[in-house]
Amino acid sequence: MIGLRSVLGVVTVMGTGALYYSTLMPDALRLGLSAAFAAVMVGAGWLRPARRGHAARGVAVVALTGWYVTDPPRNDRVWAEEYAIPADAWREGNMVHVRNVRNFRYRSVTDYLPAWYDATYDLGKLDRVDLVTSYWAGENIAHVFLSFGFSDGQHLAMSIETRRQARFPYSTIAGFFHHYELFYVTADERDLIGVRTDVRRERVYLYRLDLSPAVRERLFLSYVHAIHDIIRHPLWYNTLGDNCTTGILARAGAQLRYRFDWRIILSGHTASMAYDMNLLGPYDPKRYPDFAALHGASRIQRPAGAVIGPDYSTAIRATLPPPEGP
């Protein structure tokens, strides 16, 4: 009996959450259906005979499941401004063209000047991939993304994020349901990293990934193809199954055992996992004998009064461990 009650409790909570955090419009419908589902699941316990209650719950769960698995992600919603214009990317020979590279200029967290630009990147000049981890609370959860660097000084940061509608505030819980579409923030480092180091004042770490030229190119093109494809085939974001960190591993073709490593779920430990996989560096083992030493030295330090200028990408790497530093 305790087992059955536990299952019913989980189903009730998950079903109510799926409706409450859904994208159904108007809000009255979304809220009404979530309340109705909870009422049916709880109230059915008082129906007699008991099989009527089981039948009522069964119908509610089947109807909810049928709706949920057929609920399509979309690109035509009213989005929050930072997600309003998606990037597009395509390859022509050795050149990759990216339309709508985001480059917001931030005066504060909520006060910014929207801006985008178009750029072209030469695959032959792709010479680095950096892993960026940004912490806003504690050590266990961080936002994780990549930045691609080119020998001509260009950098392109790519972050897999939630695409938030303007009518909803951000919610961590909502990411477990069909609430956010998946979005590739394709941005200038002055935007994607700068807002974290200089505006939000998060703890941001940058590590060099030790990848061969062929792997760097394959990883970059995997992002290019995904950015182009998602415009035509939107996807749901999911906090557990398809998030900022699992998306990186999927783009990199990592084995499934790594995609479900506990350090992926607790994303603040992703860089530690990369270190154990020998994916960071190469760094001097005498100066950085373990991950703790490397982690401490890899934090981006911004001096008092620093401004996000044209030399931002060079400046944030100036004090980092070689090969990123001097």
Image (cartoon, grey):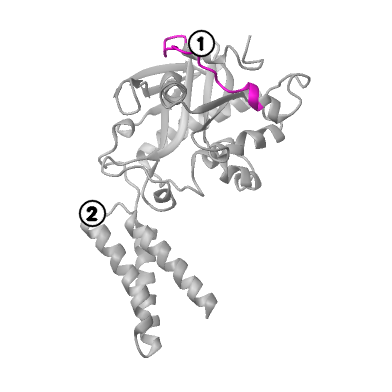
Which mark is in front, 1 or 2? 2
Counting from the top left corner in percent of width and height, residue 77 is at 26, 42
Please state if 5 lies on the left or on the right of 232 as rendered. Answer: right
Q: Amino acid at mark 1?
A: Gly
Q: Which mark is residue 153?
A: 1
User: Taking 324 as reference, is 170 above or below it?
Assistant: below
Q: Residue at x 41, y 68 (%)?
A: 12
Whichever of labels 1 and 2 marks the residue nearer the N terminus, that label is: 2
Label 2 SS:
helix
Q: Quadrant of the C terminus?
A: top right
Write the residue at 48% across / 34% down: 136
Crowding near the residue tagged with mark 1, few <14, some 14–19, many ≥20 C-alpha atoms within 10 Å = few
Q: Which residue is mark 2?
A: 27
Q: Which residues are magenta?
A: 295-311
- Secondary structure mostly seen in magenta is loop
Amino acid type, callout 2: Asp
Front residue of 67 and 83: 83
Residue found farthest to the front: 304
Q: Of helix, strand and loop, which one carries label 1?
A: loop
Q: Is residue 43 visible?
A: yes
Q: Residue furthest bottom?
A: 49
The answer to whether residue 211 is seen in the rendering is no
* Count of numbered labels shown in the rendering: 2
Q: Provide residue 234's location: percent of width, then percent of height.
A: 37, 43
